Structure formats: C-alpha cells, structure tokens
Amino acid sequence: MADSHLNALLPMLRRCSHLRFLGLYGNPLSTAVLKDLLLKSLELPDLHKVVYPFPVDCYKREPP
C-alpha cells in the first residue's frame, strides 16, 4: 500500500469506531502520511495497537 492508497482509506478507517488493531508494517509510506494517520487515529477510542512501517523517506532504497 502506498501513500495514495492510505489517503483514500483514511476517511473509511475513521468510521471504524471499534477498530482495535491496525498493521501497516511493510508498506512503503512516507513520514507525512504516517503523521496524518497518527493524528486521525486519535479519534478511534478502541484502537490500542498500530504497527507502523519505517517511513520510506528515512532510508535509502537499494539499487536493483
């Protein structure tokens, strides 16, 4: 899942008021999108565990 996919899902995720776990590890997401997710997920009262990936802008990609 890339940034554009998560941005499209965020409005729907915010409606999942009973969401308890969200695992995003392994997805190439940027720091900006992860910060936005963090702020918007504060509205979910039952969300107790989120597994975030390392932001892609924090590491270099290896050449093919």
Image (tube, rainbow, N blue to C red):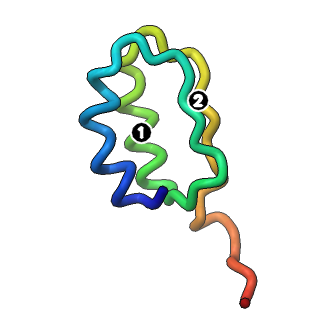
Whole-percent x, y for residue 27 in the image: 58, 55
Question: What's the amino acid at mark 2?
Answer: Val
Residue at the location (64% across, 35% down)? 51
In the depicted view, which residue is nearer to us: 15 or 48? 15
Whole-percent x, y for residue 18 in the image: 41, 11
Q: Which residue is mark 1?
A: 37
Picture layout, residue 9 above or below residue 28: above
Residue at the location (45% across, 34% down)? 38
Picture layout, residue 2 above or below residue 8: below
Whole-percent x, y for residue 60 in the image: 69, 76
In the depicted view, which residue is nearer to us: 59 or 1? 1
| Horizontal side of residue 39 vs 30, given as left or right | left
Indicate which disc residue 50 carries: 2
Residue at the location (27% across, 33% down)? 12
**Contact (Cβ within 8 Å) of mark 1 with mark 2:** yes
Whole-percent x, y for residue 9 in the image: 32, 43
Q: Quadrant of the C terminus?
A: bottom right
**Badge 2 local density, few (<14 within 10 Å), some, or many (20+)?**
some
Picture layout, residue 56 above or below residue 39: below
Residue at the location (65% across, 46% down)? 25
| Horizontal side of residue 59 vs 38, given as left or right | right
Classify mark 2: helix, strand or loop.
strand
Classify mark 1: helix, strand or loop.
helix
Please report whichever mark, 1 or 2, sits nearer to the chain's N-terminal start: 1
Question: What's the amino acid at mark 1?
Answer: Leu
In the depicted view, which residue is nearer to us: 36 or 28? 28
* Structural distance between the alpha carbons of marks 1 and 2: 10 Å
**Badge 1 local density, few (<14 within 10 Å), some, or many (20+)?**
some
